[in-house]
Image (tube, helix red, strand yellow):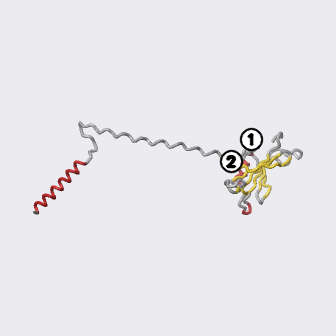
Amino acid sequence: MRLQSLKAIVWTVLLTAATAAAQTPQPFPRPGTQPAPAPPAAPRPAAPPPIAAPPAARVDPATPTEATLGFPIYPGAQFIASYDAGRAQRYYLFGSAAAFNDLVTYYRTVLKEKGNLVFQDPPTHMFEIGKFSDETMAFPPGVTIKDFTAGGSPGYPNPKAGAQPARFPSIIMIVPSPPGTPR
């Protein structure tokens, strides 16, 4: 009986080995045989629909341009409002997230003027550009920058509800020359 069980074990091992050998894939075709045809390529997934560009930010038609002001506008500055200064002049307020010193440096460079620090607290820097005439002007043409974070203030509140930033550290006031007067 022992011999029979030993034979059964040997036969089981041989059959298992033969079965395993028969199922082993051959990585390369043998000489004289042709390789099996490649399976059809999987269909390409459909291209995703194009992503629509975000709508352009609405620009208030009353927003002045550098061309209409005759002065550069600091990049990224947001138009807040304009006010009648009298004698056919307006002044235009822009809020900026930039620091006061960065704005002063920018305007010194682009206006090629040193300007004057007219107030220490809160820091206010003026660049008077062009000639002032008492008879025709209410305010000297130029750019004024005011630091609204002085004394621990959180900044000038953004008048546009929900807009960013909620407060502007600095305000830029631009006063162009009255129409018809050279700068």
Mark closest to the chain's N terminus, 1 or 2: 1
Quadrant where the C terminus is found in the figure: top right
Q: Secondary structure at mark 2?
A: loop
Viewed as shown, does residue 183 lie left or right of 7? right
In which quadrant of the rendered view does residue 158 lie? bottom right
Q: Vertical placement of 50 versus 2: above or below?
A: above
Q: Nearer the viewer, residue 133 or 28?
A: 28
Q: Position of residue 14 (x, y in %)?
A: 17, 53
Q: Amino acid at mark 2?
A: Pro
Quadrant where the N terminus is found in the figure: bottom left
In which quadrant of the rendered view does residue 133 lie? top right
- Tell me the number on the disc at residue 75: 2
Q: Secondary structure at mark 1?
A: helix
Viewed as shown, does residue 119 lie left or right of 3? right
Q: Position of residue 125 (x, y in %)?
A: 77, 53
What is the C-alpha distance between the residues marked 1 and 2? Answer: 14 Å
Viewed as shown, does residue 44 lie left or right of 105? left
Q: Nearer the viewer, residue 83 or 173?
A: 83
Q: Position of residue 3 (x, y in %)?
A: 10, 61
Instruction: Give the residue drawn at x 17%, y 56%.
Output: 12
Instruction: Give the residue drawn at x 57%, y 44%.
Output: 52
- Tell me the number on the disc at residue 67: 1
Viewed as shown, does residue 171 lie left or right of 34? right
